[in-house]
Amino acid sequence: MSVGLDDVRARDAADPLRAYRDRFVVPEGLIYLDGNSLGVLPRATIARQRAVVTEEWGTSLIRSWNDHGWIDAPQRVGAKIARLIGARPHEVIVADSVSVNLFKLIVSAATLSPERPVLLSESGNFHTDLHIASGAAELVPGMRLEVVQRAQLNERIGSDTNLLLLTHVHFKAGYRFDMAEVTARAHAAGARTLWDLSHSVGAVPLHLNRDGAELAVGCGYKYLNGGPGAPAFLYVAEHLQDRLVSPLRGWMGHAAPFAFTDDYVPAPGITRFLAGTPSILALSGLESGVDAFDGVEMDALWAKSIALFDLFAARVAERCPELICISPAEPEHRGSHISFRHPHAFEICQALIADGVIGDFRAPDVIRFGLTPLYLGHEDVWQAVERMRTILESGRWREERFAVRGKVT
Amino acid sequence: MSVGLDDVRARDAADPLRAYRDRFVVPEGLIYLDGNSLGVLPRATIARQRAVVTEEWGTSLIRSWNDHGWIDAPQRVGAKIARLIGARPHEVIVADSVSVNLFKLIVSAATLSPERPVLLSESGNFHTDLHIASGAAELVPGMRLEVVQRAQLNERIGSDTNLLLLTHVHFKAGYRFDMAEVTARAHAAGARTLWDLSHSVGAVPLHLNRDGAELAVGCGYKYLNGGPGAPAFLYVAEHLQDRLVSPLRGWMGHAAPFAFTDDYVPAPGITRFLAGTPSILALSGLESGVDAFDGVEMDALWAKSIALFDLFAARVAERCPELICISPAEPEHRGSHISFRHPHAFEICQALIADGVIGDFRAPDVIRFGLTPLYLGHEDVWQAVERMRTILESGRWREERFAVRGKVT
């Protein structure tokens, strides 16, 4: 049965998360389906950034490290993220980028169990994960990276597996691993897991402790709305924290950074995974983003994501059947974005952007739409599909200007 | 001959850099002698941060990577820093932290010449440099870190030296290496040099190309006024760029980051030293800081630094003789800060802060004052010494509250 505009408006009116949209700046007239690439600006961030710049930095200057809690920000924001991923507050810390954090955890886990030489991942994993792993494998004596198809992963996990590096929700099609099942399988073989939560955190249910996960990293600028290039976070299960030593021994991870001693003594707990001095402008942006989840239950968020996805898929099947959905139909196997294949995905994506519907092109032929349950409504989805229908029907995406590529595409 | 208040005011009135102070927020009543720990807020940063947050992020969202030049910011800001350090624009890039950048350069240089097993540094070097080097040395097969006294460095450089890791201006006493001489000595032995410019850049003359330096890193939040924890930069001489591969193979250093391929292909030139996605809030803060040097000649800056230092040293010798200056008397051997030893340095520093004179305590017994030539005046220095004189004379630093330590001291 076809869903009409009145239907979706009624759904939005009944949406228990509706009020949260007001916490964000969603530009008028824009349908922003790219919150899994760069989350929108939380309203509270504007005043907060101004205060950090003019009051904390501008007026209190160096004293803010103590007086405004700058020095504890990595742990404080980490603890807030912990609630969103099913971890304990002292198991998460904000630091560096996803890439750099992957390196820290891969190298430290590899050197902890040198008798197990294989870092195992899947081909088509987000490429920075594979590249970082290949760099780490070349450095750690005896270690090697093996990259196999997803279907071969289970049979490949064995007694030589050191670490299984997987992205929980795939950046392209949105396939999701069953974290509990995969982790149990790795454990049965004596291996550990390292999860990249970049396309999960802030939208998809996560229970790291319950599922037995030992190591994870995640992105601050997607569903967490921390700002462009926001710092990342990392998670280390409590029982592993004091057994791992970061290869990046920066002073912020030292047990006594202000003692200025030649010898390196790692800080106890999660703090040892800090490296250099963190950007406070960046960290406070992330903190505001995470604070926008105050009072939000993850289960309600996920229910909304399912509703948006199902509506999107049904409307595209009806209105734009030339687009082939490549995301999993079953909610338990997917994330919070929906992707379609089309030979002219790039041009269609550009034409949509020109029409105020922001999605993402992912090479070679995928259009990806992020369905951020915290600030999107059913009508956004409905209207987006209508605009896509217009573009396809008119053939307007064939205009030359839509074939021009920027540096970031 | 004693220098009076009228004298210093006359010097300020004649100071050709005087007008630049207006580019910065210098809080009323505060004498801020800690710009080498955290530089002050440039006025232009306030509006720029607001625009980045509300317009670029808030309104243009993901499109800003192309439309507002976010994707090129690391190279663009690096090129601006190049002018300040005597390098070519394509030899400098902004990325990560000093710690993380040290790791990239140490590991890539070490693996380039594996037949030379020694990373050589001096004891008492800034500790994050030594810690990062020790972590790198443990990872690279056959490599080892040797840390010797400064007086032993010259004789220790030999055919087994891979890399000489030195901080150009020492963070504590302010001793400065002769970059040309040390680099020539390293080259004569077939070794390379890696300079940490954190306490030099933005105040002390630097001529990396002229002096034959191959590798360097530097801090964005000290004399560059980039904001708390601002991103760092790194320099790789052109002839070495394509011979080094970063151990941190993040996607931003890939030749084609948006092709999403499993295989790692390093970008040509300096871009390969990027790792993950950079924080744009942090980067734009640094860009504003660097832009505040527009029109400023480095030689004029250094002449001013010399004048402030000499005034400070002379006034302390006259008014506070119980403080022992440990910084070099000759300008060519020092940086832009002045340090004194006193058994109660910590308490005196705290009492000064309470009195509106911000310096730094450095364990165990040093007070350090940063003399930032871009925004400090002769009267600032004069008044700071007078306030110190009052504190010493009255013994007020003995009050209990001045012995209380914060987390950052």
Image (cartoon, coloured by chain):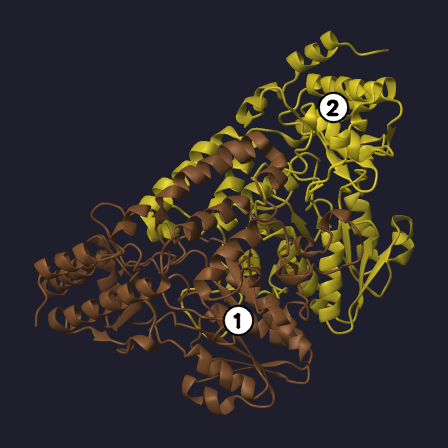
Chain colours: A yellow, B brown
Three-letter amino acid code of the residue under disc 1? His
Instruction: Identify the image quadrant of residue A83.
Output: top right
Q: Is residue A95 visible?
A: no
- Which corner quadrant holds the N terminus of chain B? bottom left
B186 over B303 or under it: above or below:
below
Left or right side of B212 for A143: right
* Kind of residue sitting beneath label 2: Leu
The residue under label 1 is B131
Say if B78 sits above or below B194 in the image. Answer: above
Disc 2 designates what residue?
A: A308
Regarding residue B20, the answer to whether it shows in the image is yes
Image quadrant in which you'd find residue B63: top right
Is there a contact, CB below 8 Å, between mark 2 and mark 1? no
Crowding near pointer 1: few (<14 within 10 Å), some, many (20+)?
many
Query: Badge 2: how crowded within 10 Å, few (<14), some, or many (20+)?
Result: many
Q: Which mark is residue B194?
A: none
Point out residue B394 in the picture as x, y percentages from the top left corner.
10, 62
User: What is the C-alpha distance between the residues marked 2 and 1?
Assistant: 49 Å
Q: Nearer the viewer, residue A293 or B54?
A: B54
Q: Please tell me whether mark 1 sits on a helix, a strand or a loop.
A: helix
